[in-house]
Image (cartoon, rainbow, N blue to C red):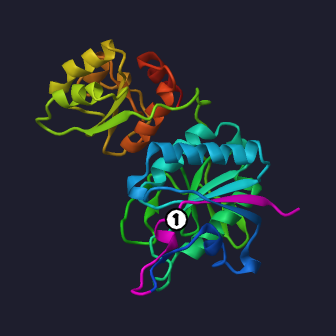
Amino acid sequence: MTKRVLLLATKDTIAYSRRPGHEAIASGADLLKTIPADLLTADVTVEDVLAEPSWDMSPATMLTLARRARAAILDDSFDGVVIIHGTDTLEDTAFLIDLQAGPAALHGGIVLTGAMRHLDDLSTDGPRNLASAITAAADPALAGVGVVACLNDELHAARWVAKVDATSVTAFSSAPHPPVGRVIGTGVEMLAPPPPRPPEPRGEPESDVALIKTYPGIDPVLLTAVVDAGARGIVLEGTGMFNVPVSLLAAISDLTEWDVPVVIASRCRTRDIDLAELPLGSGLAAKVGAIGARSLAPGKARSALMVALGPNGGVKAARDWFQRL
């Protein structure tokens, strides 16, 4: 039986033609036509989604994609979903969708793809990436794996994937983890176990979460300022093993008492360890109430905190959520 795949097209680089006099933006149906019919491995239904450029993608649009992908599998009986997305924030959207997928991830593949080269560039990578993403979404091997990014025939788990090069078609990596799989011909070969599935989400995520990069001499007023502006949670991008300047500790303590969770991620790759388990020097922030992001990159820690806060969550809900991630 032919598999059914829903294609959600948000345009961006994969759809842009930029030659002078030939500027255009291809629809999802137009992009589908770039794939030879004999290379299509599924019956594809296309829905164009009005979206901002990837570098300016709003949480509202990300959540719209998450809801549609989940409903497509659970309510509309699609075997898989492919989302065309710009590459700048593809990893952020992929992880937020993964956190929201719930049981949909157990029943079908949800695959994000895009392109580093424009549609009319020499050796454009878009058509190949799209064909491979459709093949992956239709393959039963992805059921239970969770959301993946498919670029350059590699399948990267949403939790691990990162854009590491702004110019190359080999722009995405899961390092230090391997890709979970790859597309070969008309099927998927799994290469490594996927990360564990996240907890079931609790209602709609909270979109107003701030991400602040720390630096020597940072003024703690930055933390209270974003809360005064409406943020219900903060992720701090620290250094090393979740280190932040001592000058921020009093503000972290105050925010925790006000039931505003402060999560600390690192700009480095880290072990999957609880902040409270670190030695006193590195674990000072835990003593005043901070929550560790474990091995999540700062941007993904922000997505996780958005989901953890839900409709009415606070410090306790966020702490419990990150302990179960």
Image quadrant occupied by the N terminus: bottom right
Q: Residue at x 31, y 12 (%)?
A: 257
Residue at x 47% of width, y 20% of height:
313
Instruction: Judge the density around disc 1: few (<14), some (14-19), many (≥20) Cα neighbours within 10 Å.
Output: many
Residue at 59% in and 45% down: 66
Furthest residue in direction left, as rendered = 217
Q: Is residue 74 covered in magenta? A: no
- Along the viewing direction, whichever of 14 and 273 lies nearer the viewer: 14
**Rendered residue at 46%/59% (across/down):** 173
Front-lying residue, 163 or 211? 211
Q: Which range is magenta?
A: 1-21
Q: Residue beneath label 1, please?
A: 11
Q: Position of residue 142 (x, y in %)?
A: 69, 52
Q: Secondary structure at mark 1?
A: loop
Residue 55, horizontal then vertical, whole percent: 38, 56
Depth check, front residue: 57 or 165: 57
> Mark 1 belongs to which amino acid?
Lys
